[in-house]
Image (cartoon, rainbow, N blue to C red):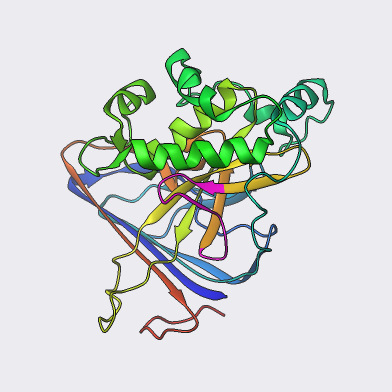
Amino acid sequence: MIYTLRHRTTYRYGRPVHFARCTLRLKPQEGEGQSVLASAVTIDPSPARAVMRRDYFGIEAVAITLEAPHTTFSVEALSTVRVERPAPPPPEFGMAWERVRDAVVAGRDLAGRAPVHFLFPSGRVPLLPAITDYARPSFSAGRSAYGAAHDLMLRIGRDFRFDAKATTVSTPLAESFALRAGVCQDFAHVMIAALRGMGLPAAYISGYLRTVPPPGRPRLRGADASHAWVAVWCGDGWLGLDPTNGVPVQDDHIVVARGRDYGDVAPVDGIVSGSGKQRLKVEVDVIPDTETQDLALVG
């Protein structure tokens, strides 16, 4: 499947901002069933400096500096991506979770994608005994790592309620777990904490999910959204699971970034020098090539 992706973020400030420094993580990733056919980012106002770099985990990010006073700041990323992944394995596929756990701590690989980096607590995902206890029923002796993680994903989908008003981007993990409610970020953080608590490496994946308009209805421009899910290390590779929707990751999921938690992969973050209120608007379109939309393809 080939997708056209449009992600537009607009900040409006009550008073002029005289200086801003931001990091943008908006380019889809290459590999693991994805190929980027084209990608471009438009920034307004134009930055005084823009430097592209790759972080330790391989995320391609652009660091920008704005030095001219402005009351509006917008970033639009437009990409064309081909996604062709193999079908997910059967739920009980692969190595026993105890073998995977023991092999990770005995491993010597310290490269950016090494499983060991995704095993320990991170800034937004502490290891909480209550979440580890919640995970245990899925981890019977000898069960495959993927089978246990798949079962955990389904349980989270049943036990937690999707509620965009229950949490914010900064809600602590313990609070969203106690509420049993939140958005995809919360679902992913809970599952990551549960897997790490049982000794399995788990990564936070940010990107997009294809949505299908109701039958007979046109696709609404800007009505899609960013999405988050989990990749679990199963001994010989990473496999994606989406606890918000209770499904393995397939061709409907488009990966932008991978990190230990949301803090590593935020699409836009940074600092501004100014006072007054600000308003944020985010518009996302995920359009497969089987549909038409009035968007210019990048070349």
Q: Can residue 217 be seen in this view?
A: yes
Q: Over which residues does the magenta segment extend?
A: 241-252
Of the pair 272 and 206, the residue shown nearer to us: 206
Vertical order, 269 against 213 (above or below): above
Residue at far right of view: 108
**In the rendering, at what x and y percent does residue 268 appear?**
42, 47
Of the pair 223 and 298, the residue shown nearer to us: 223
Q: Is residue 74 left or right of residue 116?
A: left
Q: Is residue 192 left or right of residue 245?
A: right
**Residue at 67% from the left image edge and 24% from the top image edge:** 141
**In the rendering, at what x and y percent does residue 267 appear?**
44, 49
Vertical order, 148 against 295 (above or below): above
* Residue 242 magenta-highlighted: yes
Quarter of the image where the N terminus is located: bottom right
Quarter of the image where the C terminus is located: bottom right
**Residue at 65% from the left image edge and 41% from the top image edge:** 146
* Residue 5 magenta-highlighted: no
Q: Is residue 146 left or right of residue 219?
A: right
Q: Is residue 88 left or right of residue 273?
A: right
